[in-house]
Image (cartoon, grey):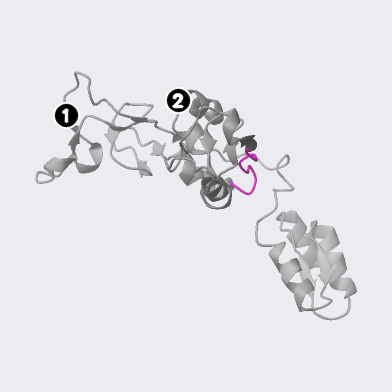
Amino acid sequence: INQTIVLLKSHNVRVSVIGLAAEVRVCSALCRETGGTYSVVLDDRHFRDLLYQHVEPPPSAAAGSQEASLVKMGFPHHEMTEGRSSSLTMCMCHIDSTSDASKLKSGGYFCPQCRSKYCELPTECRVCGLTLVSAPHLARSYHHLFPVQAFVQLDLHSTDQRYCYSCRVRFGDNEKYVYSCGTCHRVFCLECDMFIHDTLHTCPGCATHQSTFLQQGR
């Protein structure tokens, strides 16, 4: 048992135990030595609460001792060139296709390294090999470590905005409060505020504006 605990510690494995019976000393020592938690269930409701505590992974305890493994990625901002003197071009996703003429567009996602155009993300640049992703895609993997900050609740009459920036629905007369992002200062309705924090895990206002988009990427 002691050899197993030493082996787990050497590989930075954190062990947590939920006990269904009385406390066991071996389990307690295992969790203590590996930096995990040990809990004993009192009833079914307590078991559910303990189980939910392990749904989201905790921050890495060895973040300062492990060598960082970096992956070079690009975060292209969608550029619309309608109304400008720009010729229609085909994206690199469909450059080998001869029948899909609908992919001829002037806008798209441009690789920040080689400026190759793509119609959708995520993808790998066929020219320079850079991995191209968007902020919402990346947010799905680390949102439990860097959650979206709570929006500021504002009185509807204290702002000039009359439409939700996300769903573009006009604020109703029965709505007393709206919610503003502290970074991009865009205003959202209650439904979109809940959707952003519970499901999307990234602010649409910050992701669609160049200034705040670049600030988040630093």
**Residue 145 is one of the magenta-drawn residues:** yes
Amino acid marked by disc 2: Gln
Residue 29 within the magenta-colored segment of the rendering? no
Identify the image quadrant of residue 92. top left
Tag 1: residue type?
Answer: Leu
Kindly indicate the quadrant of the structure image that contains residue 75. Answer: top left
Considering every residue shown, the one lying at the far bottom of the view is 21
Point out the stretch of residues depicted in magenta: 143-151
Residue 88 image label: 1
- Residue 209 x/y as whole percent: 45, 28
Position of the C terminus by quadrant = top right
Q: Nearer the viewer, residue 155 or 200?
A: 155
Left or right for 201, reference 22:
left
Answer whether residue 72 is visible to the viewer in this image. Answer: no
Q: Is residue 53 above or below residue 41?
A: above
Q: Position of residue 33 (x, y in %)?
A: 84, 59
- Residue sticking out furthest to the left: 99
Which badge, 2 or 1, is on the more N-terminal residue?
1
Please say if 73 is above or below 99. Answer: above
